[in-house]
Amino acid sequence: MNYPVLTIVVPCYNEEEVFQETSKQLTQVIKELIDEHLISKESNILFVDDGSRDRTWDLIEAETNQNIYVKGLKLARNVGHQNALLAGLATASKQADCVISIDADLQDDIRAIRTFVEKYWEGYDIVYGVRNKRDTDTFFKRTTAVAFYRLMNKMGINLIFNHADFRLMSKRALEELLKYKEVNLFLRGIVPLIGFPSTKVMYDRKERFAGESKYPLKKMLAFAFDGITSFSVAPIRFVTLLGFLSILLSILIGGYALIQEWRHHTVSGWTSLMLSIWLIGGLQLLGIGLIGEYIGKIFKEVKKRPRYAIETDLYTKEAKQSSPAPKTSEN
């Protein structure tokens, strides 16, 4: 019986503090799944170094030499979590029958990986890891995350609630994903667009094993804004609506001013004038800023620059070395 080749893709950026433990735990998961005849013996873990400035790549390279299940992919520079993840998925799709993506911080429950594979055997092409609750988050992060998901759904963007990038994808689902060529990458919004059979696996998220979070407030807000503007023109329409309402309000205020003029009740009002200027000026700047954001995204798309560059590939290189040499005919 042919068992599926599984590759676990792990994006890494300055993860030297947690790498050894992550490698140890994921290797144990791979061994157990092989022993249970759920995946092939050729299954592996692909660590993607996203231009780390610490010893992350040195650790990956060393682990590759002593652990048959660990492979490495080094990007030439830091390109961000989503592009690093895509680089790993694209590389793994060349050999794997299914791929699981997971962050290196061990917050996602690795015990759910077995359930992912079982769902794959049941015929699902995409399996989403969904958090049961957000108890480990701060009140602010929990509140803003819920607001973000609700806002995205209101705008017609189909996101899986409480799902990050912990998921399984089959080979054919990966092939469809790689057809999406946009530079402004938001995988959580793109994957549901594929439309293949999918399901959810619930799990409890844990505290980070070691090191610091790579998504502080500033990055989270930027990530959320990118997600909104990459999938919807609703913000521009909202500003258009505000402009329309502002025009109506101006007409009403203008009519009131004319009536007061005819009745000779006009009084010079510095406060009202300044408030009007600030309000209209603020709306104009907001509108210009949003339009600029969309134009900036168009600017990035039309240049069609590569999303990442691979400096060292210990994944396909290992596969080529282990493949049998072609037979030559004897004369």
Image (cartoon, rainbow, N blue to C red):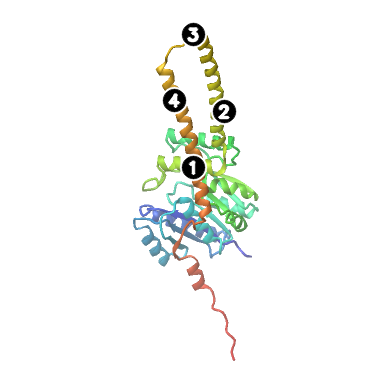
Residue type beneath disc 1? Glu
Amino acid residing under circle 3: His
Mark 4 highlights which residue? 277
Q: How many residues crowd around disc 1 within 10 Å: few (fewer than 14), some, or many (20 or more)?
A: some
In x, y percent, where is residue 192?
Answer: 60, 47
Residue 234 placement, left or right of 103: right
Q: CA distance from mark 3 to mark 1?
A: 47 Å
Residue at mark 3 to residue at mark 4: CA–CA distance? 24 Å
Residue of label 2 = 244
Question: Considering only order in the chain, which callout, 2 or 1, is on the residue closer to the N terminus?
Answer: 2
Of residues 52 and 123, which is closer to you in this image?
Answer: 52
In the structure shown, which secondary structural element does the residue marked by tag 1 occupy? helix
Kindly identify the amino acid type of the residue bearing the numbered disc 2. Phe
Front residue of 191/136: it is 191
Q: As drawn, is 294 to the left or to the right of 62?
A: right
For this orientation, the residue located farthest to the left is 54
Task: Residue under label 3, please give it.
Answer: 264
Q: Which mark is first along the chain, 2 or 3?
A: 2
Question: Vertical placement of 21 versus 317: above or below?
Answer: above
User: From this viewpoint, is residue 91 visible?
Assistant: yes
Marks 2 and 4 sit apart, C-alpha to C-alpha, by: 16 Å
The 10 Å Cα crowd at callout 3, few under 14, some 14 to 19, many 20 or more, is few
Q: Earlier in the sequence, mark 2 or mark 4?
A: 2
Q: Quadrant of the C terminus?
A: bottom right
Q: Residue at x 52, y 10 (%)?
A: 262
Residue under circle 1? 293
CA gap between label 1 and label 4 equals 24 Å
Question: Mark 1 vs mark 4: which is more N-terminal?
Answer: 4
Q: Are marks 3 and 2 in contact (CB under 8 Å)?
A: no
Q: Amino acid at mark 4?
A: Ile
Crowd tier of the residue under label 2, counting other residues whose Cα lies within 10 Å: few below 14, some 14–19, many 20 or above: few
On the image, the x and y values in percent for residue 153 come to 58, 37
